[in-house]
Amino acid sequence: MKVLHDNSKLVLNLKNGDAQSMELLFRRLYPQLCAFANKFLHDLDEAEEIVQEVFFKIWKNRANLNENESIQSYLFTAVKNGCFSLLAHNKIKDKYASLLEQIYLSGEYGTINHDSLIATELEKDFSRVLETLPPECRRIFELSRFEGRKYHEIANELNISIKTVETQMSRALSKIRVQLKDYLVTIILLELLK
C-alpha cells in the first residue's frame, strides 16, 4: 500500500513539473524497463532508446498523467508498445531493403520498371489493409473510392447517416495511411537512385 501511495505522490509531483520526481522515477525503473525492452528487441542500444523515448514522452505529457493509475504499469505498457512499433517498422524496412537488393543484384536495375514493381507491391498491401477493415467500413470505402459514390448516396443505400459515412471513411483512410506510409520512403529512395 505504501508503494502505491508513494507512486501516487510521485505522479502528482511529476504533474506539477518536479524534475526530481522524474529523476527518481527514472532511476527506480530505467534498468527494469531496459531489460524488459531487450527481451523483445535483443538489442540493448535500441532497448535503451525506446525507454528513453518513453520517459521523454512522460515528461512532455506529464499534465495528462493520472495519479490514481499505476505509473509502473503505464511505463511497461508504453515500452512494450514502443518495442512492437519498432519491430513492425524494422520488418517493413527489411522487406523493402531486400526488394531493392534483389533488383540491384539481378543487374536489371536499368531495365526493370520500378514504378510497376512498387505499384504491384502497393496493390497487394493495399488489398491486405482493406481486408483488415471492419465490413461496414470497408463497404463504405469501396462504394466511395471504387464506385465513385457520393457520401449522401452511400448513406441512402446503406440506410445510415451521412455523419456515419464520414466517420467510417475517416477511419478507413487513417488506417490505410498508417499501414502504407513506408511506401513513400521507398518511392523517394527509388526516385533519388534514378
Image (spheres, rainbow, N blue to C red):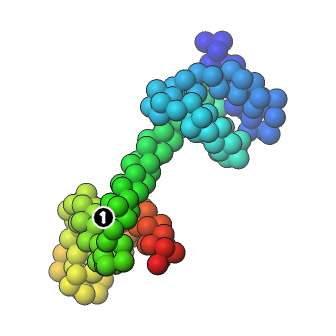
Residue situated in front as seen by the camera: 111 or 17: 111
Placement of the N terminus among the 4 image quadrants? top right
Q: Residue at x 43, y 54 (%)?
A: 93
Q: Residue at x 75, y 24 (%)?
A: 24
Q: Amino acid at mark 1?
A: Ser
Q: Position of residue 76 (x, y in %)?
A: 53, 30
Q: Position of residue 62 (x, y in %)?
A: 69, 42
Q: Is residue 42 left or right of residue 170?
A: right
Q: Position of residue 120 (x, y in %)?
A: 25, 71
Residue 165: quadrant of the picture: bottom left
Identify the residue at the far front of this view.
Answer: 107
Residue situated in front as seen by the camera: 79 or 47: 47
Q: Is residue 26 left or right of residue 184?
A: right
The residue tagged 1 is 106
Q: Position of residue 49 (x, y in %)?
A: 62, 39
Q: Is residue 162 visible?
A: no
Q: Is residue 56 left or right of residue 131?
A: right
Q: Specify few, some or many for label 1: CA neighbours under 10 Å numbering under 14, 14-19, or 20 or more.
A: few
Residue 174: quadrant of the picture: bottom left
Q: Residue at x 55, y 23 (%)?
A: 35
Above or below, 40 against 56 in this view is above
